[in-house]
Image (tube, grey):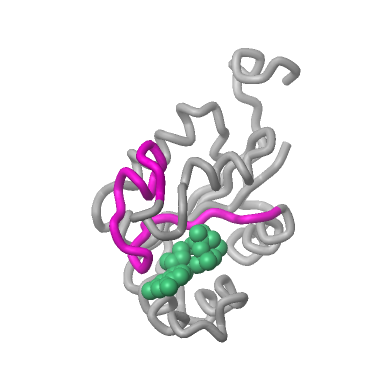
Amino acid sequence: KQRSFVMLKPDAVKRRLAGEVLTRFEKRGLKIIATKMMIIDSDLAKKHYGEHSEKPFFKDLVNYIISGPVLATVIEGEECISLIRKMVGATNPQEADLGTIRGDYAIDTGRNIIHASDSPASAAREISLFFEDSEICEYTLPDEELIYEEP
Ligand code: GTP
Ligand code: MG
């Protein structure tokens, strides 16, 4: 099964939305296999968002992401990278559909509460940036046959 890196950004933590957002992933049937709260330093923030280093919003983005604690999380499930991106919604919350996380909880692109990996390659890169292998928990959900036709 696929793994995705999901990060609740400082605005999500400070707005006490962490539990509610994680609950959405749990209710969908996805499995949380690692999570930790941390205050990212600017080095890690710049590495994580390295692809945007030349963008005009890069400095604001780094300052936003280091402005408070984040909840770094690894989620596992069938095709979960694209599934989670759909649940997260468009980058600009104004364009995000209702029923998506950004569409339900956010207004501004620069305060869009959550990050999710956009491809298998970025998921692998981001998971290894934030987690040691020993911090990732492998376990079986007891109801996998209720979630998947072929568990
Ligand atoms: P992430 O899951 O956080 O990577 O968002 P995304 O994949 O939907 O968008 P993208 O990777 O293009 O941008 C990364 C993050 O940079 C966004 O989530 C925003 O927080 C921020 N960002 C992107 N575009 C803008 C912008 O035009 N202005 C500002 N202030 N922030 C932006
Ligand atoms: Mg992105």
**With respect to residue 142, does 51 lie above or below?**
below
Answer left or right for 107 relative to 145. Answer: left
Residue pictured at 33% horizontal, 39% vertical: 20
Residue pictured at 66% horizontal, 52% vertical: 134
- Considering depth in this image, is 126 or 116 the residue closer to the camera? 116
The percent coordinates of residue 7 (x first, y second) are 48, 56
- Considering depth in this image, is 58 or 77 the residue closer to the camera? 58
The percent coordinates of residue 101 (x first, y second) are 39, 44
**With respect to residue 27, does 102 lie above or below?**
below
**With respect to residue 19, does 111 lie above or below?**
below
Check the image and name the residue furthest to the left. 15
**With respect to residue 13, does 60 lie above or below?**
below
Image quadrant where one finds the N terminus: top right
Image quadrant where one finds the C terminus: top right
Residue 66 visible (yes or no): no
The answer to whether residue 62 is magenta is no
Highlighted magenta segment, given as a residue range: 96-119
- Considering depth in this image, is 21 or 105 the residue closer to the camera? 105
Residue pictured at 56% horizontal, 83% vertical: 53
The percent coordinates of residue 12 (x first, y second) are 32, 55
